[in-house]
Amino acid sequence: MRIFAELKWFFWEERKAYVSGILVLMFVAFLQLIPPKVIGIVADSVKDGTITKAGMGKWVAILLSAGLAMYVMRYFWRIMIFGSAVKLTRKLRDQLFEHFTKMSPGFYQNRRIGDLMAHATNDLQAIQQTAGVGVLTLVDSLATGGFVILAMAFTISWKLTLIALIPMPLMAWLTSWFGTMLHRSFHKAQEAFSSLNDKTQESISGIKVIKTFGQEQEDIEDFTKQSEDVVEKNITVAKIDALYDPTISIIVAISFFLSIGFGARDVLNGTMTIGELISFTTYLGLLIWPMLAFGWLFNIVERGRASYDRVASLLRQPQDIRDTPEAIAHTPAGDIEYCIKEFAFPGEESPLLKDIYFSTGKGETLGIVGKTGAGKTTLLKLLIREYTNISGEIRFGGANIESYRLEQLREAIGYVPQDHFLFSATVAENIAFARPDASRDEIIAAAKLANIHEDILGFTNGYETVVGERGVSLSGGQKQRISIARALILNPEVLILDDSLSAVDAKTEEAILGALKQEREGKTTIITSHRLSAIQHANLILVIEEGRITERGTHEQLMENDGWYREMYLRQQLEELVEHGGQ
């Protein structure tokens, strides 16, 4: 029952609803005692020949009144208890989602999306069952069982009641044993479901790649294997679950056998009437539900505890990037200065970046080039504080970026990543993502700057065209330019283009860069690119090799050196010349 202690914070928040629901539920349990007693009285009246029409009408009216009262009150306790359980699911789902949005990239590198989705769906459903059906089952089984036992003991025979309860300790021990096994098995079943969920999400997202390489059959076989594993683990849960009802039925049968055997002896001895024995066995019938419910309770509670453990484990994961209480609340502006001795990803021993020292003035353009994997993207992500374990500091506007509130820091930066993620919304909504209140004129202006306006006008519904999940209906160049427009609509102090022009041709690249240079005068732009023509106009160009700055300067200065930059620039110029047939 540890899960109820762990959820006490929620029960306290919803104490009015739960207390009211439990009181109503207990009153319903009390009303259930009336019919068996009435049946016994009527049976004795029939046997004695004292039954009258008026008396029979009175007992029928009592039964109808009790039934109507139970009908109404069962409606209200369901609203109070089950309604509160739904609120718990909403609260935990909100907490999980907010927690996900605050976690660093390292959190997602170690976890699968499908697994996180399973926590937010399947696990929360199991927790809701515990807070709803679990509370109902606990209270109802204890209240109904307690009232019935008291009625049997004090209104009929306490001796016969003790005899009927002899098998109960055995039932308590067996259900506890089953509960322990169920907890372990259900935990494994939930993990298997998470893996299957992740497999499904990954396969659907990568269906084009699967089809391109002709791996449909292999992927189906892998899915089938994982699906069978889920079935196998859930069957194990079902086998343990299936032990509850037969076990409890046997215990109840033993109780009935003892009650009827010893009760019949008392009737023959004259110490109990036939009506009292009928009432007793009817009460004993009412005990079947509490006994079954008690077994069912262990099932619900162990499922809920396993799921709550998984969700709580996620929520306990620390947030790597936090604002300090004295964090600067205004949006930064000014020069950017990198003073990094070294940086390594969390959990990695060898540093990815070493001895990174440079500065770029406000309104200047910084170009960063280098081989794939040299550390260019990591260098940029440090500026937006995706990672914090830096040996050194980065200063923006004269202050360490960690001294700013994260929200204000990122308001100053428009970042266009290599992976251009678009949402399943219209083109206009994607461009205005960071500024939902942007006017259509502002959206169009940003699209024109990104040289995507004419393409959008050619779409079926123009700016109202739904792009599909992750922009599946668009070309790579169109997705890149819409992503650029999404960053430009913020008019950020710093615009970062992280290899964001790789899918456009040289003419489109030149048009975009020309528009940015004209429209973003006085604001900083940082560009990483494999195509050196995209950064040759920069005020400062850095060449990164294996996490170190090996060359720096303007295009003209770097061309005077016999280094990587000059060699790569001449090679790209030759390739372009060949592509144009020597013209």
Image: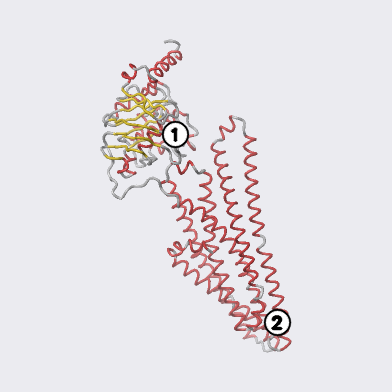
- Quarter of image, res 168: bottom right
User: Horizontally, is 22 left or right of 513 in the view?
Assistant: right
Residue 76 is situated, as x and y percent measured from the top left of the image, at 50, 67
Provide the residue designation for mark 2.
Answer: 263
Q: What amino acid is found at the position of numbered circle 1 in the picture?
A: His
Residue 374's mark?
A: none
If you read the primary sequence from the N terminus, does the residue marked by circle 2 or circle 1 appear first? 2
Graded by Cα atoms within 10 Å as few (under 14), some (14 to 19) or many (20 or more), the crowding at tag 2 reads: many
Q: How many numbered callouts?
A: 2
Tag 2: amino acid = Gly
Local crowd size for mark 1, using a 10 Å CA cut-off: few (<14), some (14–19), many (≥20): some
The picture places residue 425, in percent across and down from the top left corner, at 45, 39
Most foreground residue, 361 or 277: 361
Q: Secondary structure at mark 1?
A: loop
Of residues 394 and 477, which is closer to you in this image? Answer: 394
Q: Which of the pair 29/53 is nearer the observer?
A: 29
Which residue was labeled with disc 1?
420
